[in-house]
Amino acid sequence: DAKTTQPTSMDCAEGRAANLPCNHSTISGNEYVYWYRQIHSQGPQYIIHGLKNNETNEMASLIITEDRKSSTLILPHATLRDTAVYYCIAAPSQAAGNKLTFGGGTRVLVKP
Amino acid sequence: EAGVVQSPRYKIIEKKQPVAFWCNPISGHNTLYWYLQNLGQGPELLIRYENEEAVDDSQLPKDRFSAERLKGVDSTLKIQPAELGDSAVYLCASSFSGGNTEAFFGQGTRLTVV
């Protein structure tokens, strides 16, 4: 799996958009970008994934650059419950049963 | 529908004692994963099952760790004997094998070895 690089931590204001960057400059053509988050004392939770096109669901939006070397997870209106560690992972399709290789993630603190 | 269920939630044991963790995946999920998470770090894969077959156990320390998934449903992870460095959270996850689907994680078992 390609290595990903994320900031160690970031703060954001409640009600504002949170933009979480991720670099994956060595990503290969068959690797997707996955985002998971882990709230304190819970297991990781899937957020979103994409290959080339931007993706949006009820939780977040994923913007992938045209060269696919970086991406941004956007939480449109951050709430206090979004405080968590966010993991960006580059991996082949999970359908292939490939393991998810978690890095250190970004510790996001949403402040009132 | 219940998610991935793990038990116990917490476990404290003395070093050199055995310990076992249990996982019940989401119904119908063929793939089951066991992850280890040390404090302040991301989860690391220990073993992955496709039905009852362990297809990736390269990261499992086989001298003291063992796992089984009888009948391709529930799974048990065992450590014998436990060492102080085994203190961590042990996470179980499951997913469908077909299609590009997400993995669902349990809440984990927090092990403390004293």
Image (cartoon, helix red, strand yellow):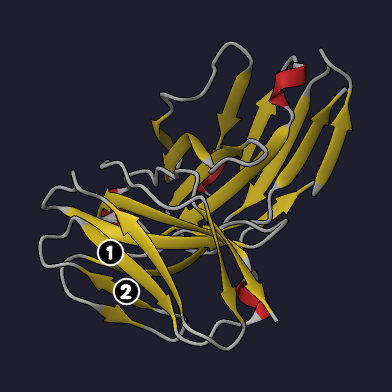
Q: Which residue is mark 2?
A: A62
Q: Label 1 is placed on what type of residue?
A: Ser
Q: Total marks drawn? A: 2
Above or below for A106 versus A5: below
Q: Residue at point 67% right, 75% down?
A: A111
Q: Where is residue B86 drawn, in percent x and y?
A: 70, 24
Of all chains, the one bearing label 2 is A
Of all chains, the one bearing label 1 is A
Q: Residue at point 64% right, 37% down?
A: B76
Q: Is residue A11 left or right of residue A95?
A: right
- Using a 10 Å C-alpha cutoff, classify the residue at mark 1 as few (fewer than 14 neighbours), some (14 to 19) or many (20 or more): many
- The reply to whether the C-beta atoms of the residues labelled 1 and 2 are less than 8 Å apart is yes
Q: Which residue is mark 1?
A: A71
Above or below for A83 versus B107: below
Q: Secondary structure at mark 2?
A: strand
**Residue at mark 1 to residue at mark 2: CA–CA distance:** 7 Å
Q: Where is residue B78 drawn, in percent x and y?
A: 68, 27
Residue A46 or residue B4, whichever sits in front: A46
